[in-house]
Image: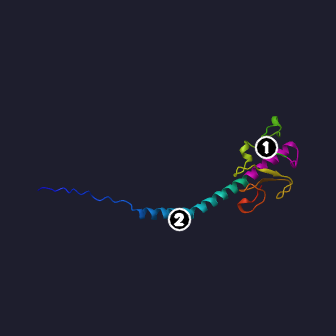
Amino acid sequence: MHHHRSSRRPARRAFTLLEIIVVVTIIALLAALVAPRLLQNVDKTKVSSAKAGCSAIAKQLSIYLMDIGRSTPEDDMDLSILLQGPDDGGGSGGPYLSKAADLIDPWKNEYYLRVPGEVNYDFDVVSNGADGQPGGDGYNADITN
C-alpha cells in the first residue's frame, strides 16, 4: 500500500481581530471597576498611617516634655527637637524619634505642632492630609493625634 501525502498544510488556528478586541474590552471594563476600589483602599491606608504617626509623635513629645520639666510645649516648638540627643540640645532621654522620616506624613509633608490644641487641650500633632493644605474634608481633612 502506498500512502499518499497531502501537500496541504493543516490550517493553523489564530485569534481574529474581533476576538482580541473583545478580550481587551473586557479587561478594560474590569480595570475600570476595580481601580477605584484599590485607590480608595490606598487612601484609607494613608489616613490610618497618618493617624498612627500623629499619635506616635504626640507620645514621644509628651515624654520629651516630662524630661525637660514642662507640661506643654512652647508655641514655636519645632518637632525636629525629638530627633536630638541630650548632647545636641534634646531632652535627657533623647532622641525620642529614630529618623527624620518619622516627622513626614504619608503624603510627604511634615507633621506640625499646634499649640494650644484644637482637638486636644494642650497640643495637637497635625498632618494636613492628602491636599497638604490646612482644613479640608474627606481625604483632604487634617489628621490629628
- Magenta segment, prevailing SS (helix, strand or loop): helix
Asked which secondary structure carries label 1, the reply is helix
The vertical placement of 38 against 82, above or below, is below
**Which quadrant of the figure has residue 129?**
bottom right
Report the side of 27 relative to 136 (left or right): left
Q: Are marks 1 and 2 in contact (CB under 8 Å)?
A: no
Residue, far front: 17
Magenta region includes residue 129: no
Query: Under tag 2, what secondary structure?
Result: helix
Q: Position of residue 32 (x, y in %)?
A: 56, 63
Q: Nearer the viewer, residue 49 or 131?
A: 131
Query: What amino acid is found at the position of numbered circle 2 in the picture?
Result: Leu
The verdict on residue 54 being magenta is yes
Q: Residue furthest left?
A: 1
Say which quarter of the image contains residue 85: top right
Q: Nearer the viewer, residue 52 or 138?
A: 138
- The residue beneath circle 1 is 80
On screen, 84 above or below 5? above
Residue 119 percent across, percent down from the top left: 82, 58
> Which residue is depicted at the point 36% across and 59% down?
14
Q: Position of residue 56 (x, y in %)?
A: 75, 50
Q: Earlier in the sequence, mark 1 or mark 2?
A: 2
Amino acid on which disc 1 is placed: Ser
Colouring chosen for the image of the structure: rainbow
Q: Quadrant of the N terminus?
A: bottom left
| Quadrant housing the C terminus | bottom right
Which residue is disc 2 drawn over? Answer: 29
Q: Residues within 10 Å of mark 1 (few under 14, many from 20)?
A: some
The region drawn magenta spans 53-76
Categorize mark 2 by other alpha carbons within 10 Å: few (<14), some (14-19), many (20+): few
Residue 138 bears which disc, if any? Answer: none
Residue at screen point 72% across, 53% down: 52
